[in-house]
Image: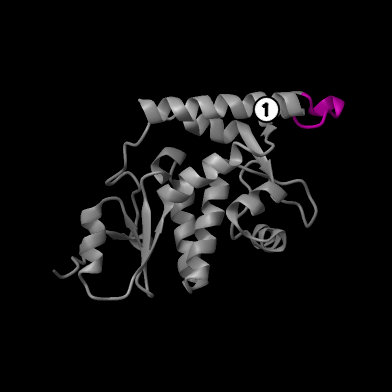
Amino acid sequence: MAVNNGLHLHVRLEDRENLNDNAIQGELFEFDDEDTTLGYRGSVASKVAGITYRQLDYWARKQIVAPSITPSHGSGSRRLYSFKDVVILAVSKKLLDAGVNLQNVTTAIGFLTQRNVSQLEHITIMCDGEHVYECTSNERMMELLDTGHAVFAVSVGSLWHRIHTALEQEDAVDVNRQALTADIGQQPIDDLTAARMRKNQKARHQSRQSA
């Protein structure tokens, strides 16, 4: 079956103009609140995403993948990455490791950045060597595979779950608390608070799985 150039089955990311078209309902958006209130240091983000800190620093300085909570201000500055940032870092690494050129990787990054956290859980990114595509169903993936071209796929959803589990074991910064205590120079959350936050994250994750 030939690929329909109208892109109603799978959409080249560079051709997307309205991200509301074919939008994914996904889960309720409570996780988005968690994503914006918990931040992760660069050392945590790079480890969980599977890249070196030097690569993380380079991407931040070049604005390829920049931290969305606390922007970078040069090497060594205290950056804070959101959960979504770490997912995008991991996807970028997968695409680059597969030989996808930087232009297509940047296109994918721009697309993923505009999606909310819940939507990322249901997306697969596919590349045929020339273009990067969004696939949100098995039918869309089969349509692209039926062209006979070699394609590479990254399951954003699988990375989403792996990174969510990994970050539960890492120290996080309570962004709201840090903002409230910035004037008195208080450091990010202590070990007891971090442990409690990880416990709450795990409970919410288990609740969603059993729902």
Q: Name the residue at the left extreme.
A: 1
192 in relation to 70, above or below: above
**Dominant secondary structure of the magenta stretch?**
loop
User: Is residue 196 shown left or right of residue 142?
Assistant: right
If the image is split into quadrants, where does the N terminus sit? bottom left
Residue found at x 62% / y 34%: 38
Q: Which residue is mark 1?
A: 195
Amino acid type, mark 1: Ala
Q: Residue at x 34, y 36 (%)?
A: 26
Q: Is residue 170 left or right of residue 138?
A: right
Most extreme residue toward the right, as rendered? Answer: 184
Q: Position of residue 198 (x, y in %)?
A: 61, 30
Regarding mark 1 in the picture, which secondary structure is present there? helix
Residue numbers of the magenta segment? 181-189
Is residue 183 rendered magenta in the image? yes
- How many neighbours does mark 1 have within 10 angstroms: few (below 14), some (14-19), or many (20 or more)? some
Q: Quadrant of residue 16?
A: bottom left
**Which is nearer the eye, 20 or 191?**
191
Position of residue 134 measured from the top left corner of the image (x, y, whole percent): 34, 57
Drawn side of residue 179 relative to residue 48, left or right: right
